[in-house]
Image (cartoon, grey):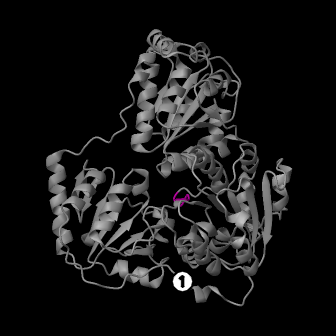
């Protein structure tokens, strides 16, 4: 279509669905996850017409997980489900995105506005004429709800929802009735990109907070920086990195903050999670006279059972919604601007030299004669195998805690769900993350670590990965059940067991051809792991096949950090 015809079309108006999907493309969405249903089918016709790709997942829950993983790599994602039965299947995934600040645009195909006004007894309803009941549910896990019942308001509501999704880094809900799909809206609005910049801090307030922070920084002799997930979610990584590099202050990450800091920096010290930290890290952080906490989320798993020992009198908290210096709160002063100005005005600090512990384990300690693949051996060893720019996804359970002991090379993206902790999340998220990486046309490897019990919940997404010709590396930790649950309660009880599957045969069952689409492996010893890690085809970011590994570990083995958290959970009666 010529530019003149396109301009004329925008002026004359375009269909609501076209406006919606073109806006999504403008903000960076390349693919749309979801499951077709009769109330969204007409809208789905507009996806490919507007330069987007339809993924098509095995179920709505998996689609929601995949959209979450896609958003964490891409910056924003879109999910389409049908009214009632479809959207409710995705609610768990959307709640996780809300909990962990992940921007997902959830589009729900609705019955016609006429049917809604008439309270008709339609399928996928509760049979009581209430068509708003499900949107009310989703309102609790969305930062905006836009019901597109009037074409005169549709474009404004779409723009507002997408803007809020990205600025607040949380899901939004868009209800699209099937008879509104083809209604006309002002297409000329698309010529003006959405303003996705954070509003600047009020200058006088910001300057005052910066001066207060600098005062305590210059008084400190033994400060540390602790970076957490909200530095990632609220786009403060550049400001954080610049501050870390210029200040030279020892820096640590919380578990949810893995990947937020360049772990090759000389002042990087490891993962701090209270009693779940290694001894040197815990002592260094808890002995600090000032803790500069950036984007903290102080949940139970993220703090190893609330075992942080840092006084608020020694803490400065930087957040998207404000800054807290000791017990003085400065709401509305966003961390991005404050960190930038603090770095700019930093000057010479008076930091006393001291030990800067790391999570590194000497190579000699990794070379043991015991052939069994243990958690204590595997995760530090993994750090030597990872490459810059890898995307590493870990499932709730042993993987989530084991990765604390893995030293990342630079620019690794870490994806986990430490706060929401929905079992099975990681496999779906792997599909979304791998797709986002593919769309970016980079040579990033997407690597998944998930337990056998977790994998059984969402194994179908392996099918979607094969169908979409994605090539992640998938490690299924075969340890006979729910290890994290065993440690909390019921070590040998049958409810923590799972049926043993022939995992290596699943890619074939899902239509993958060995050698063409997939490569499968089973490793049971450290020697076999080393051989696999040295296999040029397996390790290469250029390999086009999905690589699927059965990684056999003892059923009762777990990372030390997980043992600590599980013991704490057991004492609290979960």
In this rendering, the answer to whether 163 lies above or below 149 is below
Q: Is residue 115 visible?
A: yes
Would residue 554 appear left or right of 438 to someone viewing this image? right
Find residue 118 and report its horizontal and vertical position in percent.
Answer: 60, 13
Would residue 361 appear left or right of 521 to someone viewing this image? left
Residue drawn at (71%, 79%) of the image: 373
Q: Along the line of sight, which residue is nearer the eye, 135 or 531?
A: 531
Q: Is residue 92 visible?
A: no
Would residue 554 appear left or right of 12 to someone viewing this image? right
The reply to whether the magenta stretch includes residue 415 is yes
Find residue 558 and report its horizontal and vertical position in percent.
Answer: 64, 76
Would residue 96 appear left or right of 249 to someone viewing this image? right
Residue drawn at (53%, 50%) of the image: 73
The span shown in magenta is 414-419
Quadrant for residue 58, please give it: top right
The reply to whether the magenta stretch includes residue 305 is no
Residue under circle 1?
Answer: 361
Find residue 560 and report its horizontal and vertical position in percent.
Answer: 57, 79
Find residue 381 and report its horizontal and vertical position in percent.
Answer: 61, 77
Helix, strand or loop for the magenta stretch, by majority: loop
Q: Using a 10 Å C-alpha cutoff, classify the residue at mark 1 as few (fewer than 14 neighbours), some (14 to 19) or many (20 or more).
A: some
Residue drawn at (36%, 54%) of the image: 236
Quadrant containing the N terminus is top right
Q: How many marks?
A: 1
Tag 1 secondary structure = loop
In this rendering, the answer to whether 434 lies above or below 132 is below
């Amino acid at each position: 279509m010529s530019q003149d015809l396109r301009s004329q079309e925008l002026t004359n108006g375009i269909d609501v669905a076209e406006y919606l999907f073109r806006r999504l493309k403008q903000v960076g969405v390349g693919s749309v996850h979801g499951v077709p249903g009769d109330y969204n089918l007409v809208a789905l016709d507009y996806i490919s017409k507007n330069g987007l790709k339809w993924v098509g997942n095995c179920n709505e829950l998996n689609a929601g997980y995949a959209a979450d993983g896609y958003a964490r790599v891409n910056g924003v994602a879109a999910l389409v489900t049908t009214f009632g039965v479809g959207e409710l299947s995705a609610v768990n995934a959307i709640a996780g995105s809300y909990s962990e600040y992940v921007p997902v645009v959830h589009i729900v195909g609705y019955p016609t506005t006429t049917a809604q006004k008439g309270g008709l007894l339609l399928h996928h309803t509760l049979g009581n004429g209430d068509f708003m009941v499900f949107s009310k549910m989703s309102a609790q896990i969305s930062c905006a709800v836009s019901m597109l019942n009037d074409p005169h308001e549709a474009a404004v509501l779409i723009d507002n929802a997408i803007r809020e999704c990205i600025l607040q880094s949380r899901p939004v809900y868009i209800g699209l009735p099937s008879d509104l799909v083809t209604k006309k809206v002002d297409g000329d609005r698309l010529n003006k990109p959405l303003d996705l910049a954070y509003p600047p801090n009020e200058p006088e307030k910001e300057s005052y907070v910066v001066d207060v922070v600098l005062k305590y920084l210059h008084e400190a002799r033994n400060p540390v920086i602790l970076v957490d997930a909200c530095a990632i979610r609220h786009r403060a990584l550049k400001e954080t990195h610049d501050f870390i590099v210029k200040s030279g202050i020892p820096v640590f990450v919380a578990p949810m903050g893995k990947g937020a800091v360049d772990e090759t920096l000389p002042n990087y010290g490891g993962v701090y999670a209270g009693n779940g930290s290694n001894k040197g890290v815990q002592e260094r952080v808890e002995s600090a006279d000032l803790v500069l906490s950036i984007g903290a989320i102080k949940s139970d798993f993220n703090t190893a059972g609330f075992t942080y020992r840092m006084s608020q009198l020694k803490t400065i908290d930087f957040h998207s919604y404000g800054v807290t210096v000791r017990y003085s709160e400065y709401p509305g002063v966003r961390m991005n601007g404050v960190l930038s100005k603090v770095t700019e005005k930093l000057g010479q600090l008076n930091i006393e030299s001291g030990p800067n512990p790391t999570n590194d384990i000497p190579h000699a300690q990794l070379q043991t004669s015991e052939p069994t693949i243990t958690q204590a051996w595997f995760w530090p060893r993994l750090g030597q195998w990872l490459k810059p720019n890898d995307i590493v996804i870990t499932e709730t359970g042993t993987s989530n805690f084991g990765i604390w002991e893995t030293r990342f090379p630079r620019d690794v993206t870490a994806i986990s769900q430490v706060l929401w902790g929905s079992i099975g999340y990681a496999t779906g998220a792997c599909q979304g993350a791998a797709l986002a990486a593919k769309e970016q046309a980079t040579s990033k490897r997407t690597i998944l670590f998930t337990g056998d019990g977790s994998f059984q919940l969402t194994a179908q997404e392996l099918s979607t990965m094969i169908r979409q010709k994605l090539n992640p590396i998938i490690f299924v930790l075969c340890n006979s059940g729910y290890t994290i649950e065993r440690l909390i309660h019921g070590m040998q009880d049958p409810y923590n067991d799972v049926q043993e599957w022939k995992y290596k045969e699943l890619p074939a069952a899902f239509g993958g051809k060995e050698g063409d689409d997939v490569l499968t492996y089973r490793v049971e010893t450290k020697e076999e792991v080393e051989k696999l890690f040295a296999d040029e085809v397996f390790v290469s970011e250029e390999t086009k096949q999905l690589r699927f590994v059965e990684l056999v570990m003892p059923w009762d083995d777990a990372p030390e950090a997980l043992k600590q958290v599980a013991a704490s959970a057991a004492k609290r009666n979960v």
